[in-house]
Amino acid sequence: MSVSQPDASLPDHAALIALAQRLKTNGYRFVTPTPLTHQQVNQRPENRTAASLRDVFGWSRLIPETMLPLAEAQGLLEAGILERSEDGLKSRVRFSSLDDLLLMHSAFPTLDEDSVFFGPDTYRFAQSINHHLQSTSHPIKRAADIGCGTGAGALLIAVARPDAQVYAVDINPKALHFAQANAVVAGLHNMQCCHSDILSGLTGNFDLIVANPPYMKDAKRRAYRHGGDALGADLSVRILRESLDRLTPGGSLVLYTGVAMVGEHDPFFEAVRDDIDHAALAWTYRELDPDVFSEELLEEGYEDVDRIAAVELVVTRRG
């Protein structure tokens, strides 16, 4: 097991935490929309530059030189939280609200290969986790959030089950950097961030495994978006197969993902049906939203896709 190490190219850890705590104290809240909505709202002429901290750290708008005191702006620049471009000053980090949590992640637009995503998928993923936590009677002593990103899933579990040891795992150092800071801001001591490809970096079994993997077929193969071949389903299939043997008796996998539906075919479910359809496992599968990210259908590789559906698969190992 390896714990993420500091990276000089990342925003300063202590400065991120201090900024997040300040925003929380000031009552800051921001619900992050889809990238398309974000783009359309920001393209309105009156929204070109920021007029509030919500504009700066939520909408990722340009910061007028007169908005922040010079010393504060310089401090945030030196901490790597702000950056100066040809257009002006801008935050490299966004802060989004999830229940009572405030989570830091990558600024809009998320173009970098190591961007840390947060958006409507995260909110649906959170609903799946909360529903499971409210409905299960199985004790949760160890849990893992695969491909944790901001750590949203791990944080929700750690809050709801304070006696559990929760692992937030990712292969992206920036994600682990943000997730660690988010745990500190939330005041949690039962969540550990680890570098791990799925569960390969962890030992033992788990009472709960959750995952919200990327599921797009991304031409640039950016890790936060690209779900692999099979129209983006490969990573979700791999997570399921590598998780099933790591469940304790009574333990569950809650997998939220998206599926590129081709006619009446569900490529993800067809790929995993034989893995889950046997006596040792109980499962439920449902569509949470029949049509998400419709703009992706214009991209190369989606010519035969009718829609992209958000789905939830819950698999429980019988006790």
Image (spheres, rainbow, N blue to C red):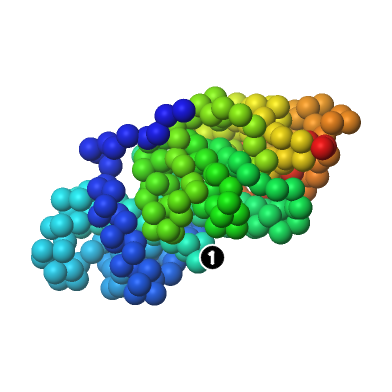
Q: Nearer the viewer, residue 250 or 81?
A: 250
Residue 219 in the image: x percent, y percent? 48, 31
* Quadrant (top left, top right, bottom left, bottom right) of the C terminus: top right
216 to 101, vertically: above or below? above
User: Is any part of residue 270 visible from this angle?
Assistant: no
155 sits to left or right of 269:
left
What is the secondary structure assignment of the residue under circle 1? Answer: loop
Q: Image point 64% across, 32% down: which residue?
A: 205
User: Is any part of residue 235 visible from this angle?
Assistant: yes
Residue 11 in the image: x percent, y percent? 27, 47
26 to 109, vertically: above or below? below
88 sits to left or right of 175:
left
Residue bearing mark 1? 99
141 sits to left or right of 69:
right
Residue situated furthest right in the rendering = 279
Please identify the quarter of the rendering in which residue 102 is found: bottom left
Q: Image point 52% across, 34% down: which residue?
A: 226
Residue situated furthest front in the rendering = 163
Q: Image point 20% across, 50% down: which residue?
A: 79
Q: Nearer the viewer, residue 88 or 298?
A: 88
Q: Nearer the viewer, residue 204 or 225?
A: 204
The amino acid type of the residue labelled 1 equals: Asp
Please identify the quarter of the rendering in which residue 135 is found: bottom right
